[in-house]
Amino acid sequence: MFVPKLLVEYWRDMKLDTIKEDRTLLANNNRADVYYSVRKKKLSVKVKGKVVDNPGIVVMENVQLVVSQAGRKRVLSSGHNNVHAYVRGRILMSEPNPVSFDTLTKLLEKYQKDGWEIESASYNPFKHETFVITTKPNEGNPVYKADAALVNGNEIFLMNRRV
């Protein structure tokens, strides 16, 4: 269904030379949880309960979008943020800094031309119980999984292969 080599080729075509496959995160095919820290204004990657990286951009496969309802209730009752929503999957690549809007646009256009359906998603505990699609025509629909995801800072792009 999903070919990691294809992603690597896209990155190389875009001349993002600093992006490397992260061997430590790929070891043993560990699932990782990626979340955006509103307080720190950066991504965190958690593997087996431990934060192992703070990249600017991450590409993942076999993605689940997870929201802890207990954590959401604590946010609603206290008004204080806590980590309770994340993108879970196998990390294919990461880069220390987020990519520019222009580079991101070119990259996503290339995916679309090659048969990927791309939608952006977000999560706001005060508005929704789950992650939701933020692009039309599916805007506002809940989303729980995707073939792949590109997380660039606080932006989430879900990618599914067109059948």
Image (cartoon, rainbow, N blue to C red):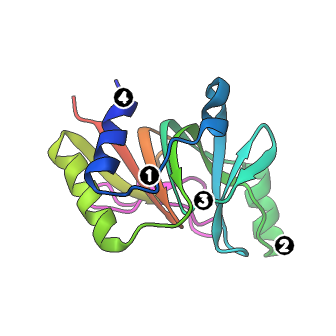
Q: Residue at x 52, y 66 (%)?
A: 97
Q: Give the CA separation, mark 3 to mark 2.
A: 29 Å
Q: Give the CA separation, mark 3 to mark 4.
A: 23 Å
Q: Is residue 117 left or right of residue 56?
A: left
Q: In the rendering, at what x and y percent does residue 18 appear?
A: 46, 57
**Picture quadrant where residue 25 is located:** top right
**Lower sequence index among marks 4 and 2:** 4
**Lower sequence index among marks 3 and 4:** 4
Would you name the residue on which mark 4 appears? 2
What amino acid type should be assigned to the residue bearing mark 2? Ser
**Lower sequence index among marks 3 and 1:** 3
Q: Residue at x 81, y 46 (%)?
A: 50
What amino acid type should be assigned to the residue bearing mark 1? Leu
Q: Residue 55 — which label?
A: 3
Would you name the residue on which mark 2 appears? 78
Closer to us: mark 3 or mark 4?
3
Q: Give the CA separation, mark 4 to mark 2.
A: 41 Å
- Local crowd at mark 2 within 10 Å, few (<14), some, or many (≥20)? few
Secondary structure mainly formed by the magenta segment? loop
Q: In the rendering, at what x and y percent does residue 19 appear?
A: 46, 52
Would you name the residue on which mark 1 appears? 150
